[in-house]
Image (cartoon, rainbow, N blue to C red):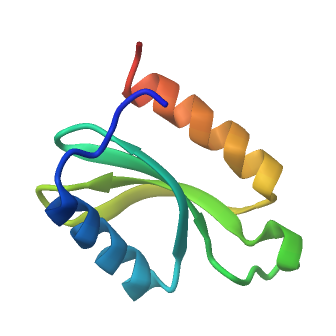
């Protein structure tokens, strides 16, 4: 894990936005201003095994940015790690 979410308030905001989209958050890494989220959409037009995705979340604005959808859990984990490594370099 590269970074930790420090404020419970920000997590509540992120969770509320995910719920509006019908997503269940599987994993998140964040800094003060943004987060990378791996989520389960619960459905996909490509079958139940392709229901995962990743996205950026911007805390100040309270919305998700660019996302990758219709991934298997393994594909989503790889994409999540690559996004985290780019966004939160160690």
Q: Is residue 15 left or right of residue 70?
A: left
Q: Which residue is drawn at 53% across and 78% down?
A: 23
Residue 56 lies left or right of residue 41; in this view the side is: left
Please indicate, yes or no, whether residue 68 appears anywhere in the rendered image. no
Q: Along the line of sight, which residue is nearer the eye, 31 or 21?
A: 31
Q: In this view, does 55 lie above or below 14?
A: above
Give the number of marks. Answer: 0
Q: Which residue is drawn at 34% across and 47% down?
A: 35
Farthest residue toward the top? Answer: 90
The correct choice, above or below, for 5 with respect to 16 in the image is above
Question: Does the rendering let one see residue 20?
Answer: yes
Residue 56 position, x and y percent, is 40, 51
Q: Where is residue 10 in the image (x, y as percent from the top left)?
A: 19, 60
Q: Where is residue 67 in the image (x, y as percent from the top left)?
A: 51, 57
In the rendered image, residue 15, in percent from the top left (x then y), is placed at: 35, 72
Asked if residue 57 is positioned above or below residue 45 in the image, the reply reads above
Question: Is 23 left, or right, of 13 in this rendering?
Answer: right
Q: Which residue lies furthest to the left in this view?
A: 60
Instruction: Tell me the quadrant of the picture where the C terminus can be found.
Output: top left
Q: Which residue is drawn at 49% across and 31% down?
A: 1
Q: Which residue is drawn at 18% across and 43% down?
A: 33
Q: Is residue 52 left or right of residue 46?
A: left
């Amino acid at each position: 894990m590269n970074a930790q979410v420090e404020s419970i308030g920000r997590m509540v905001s992120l969770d509320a936005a995910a719920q509006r989209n019908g997503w269940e958050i599987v994993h998140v890494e964040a800094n003060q201003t943004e987060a990378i989220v791996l989520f389960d959409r619960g459905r996909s037009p490509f079958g139940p095994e392709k229901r995962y995705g990743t996205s950026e979340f911007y805390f100040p604005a309270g919305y998700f940015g660019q996302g990758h959808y219709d991934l298997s859990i393994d594909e989503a984990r790889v994409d999540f790690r690559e996004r985290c490594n780019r966004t939160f370099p160690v």
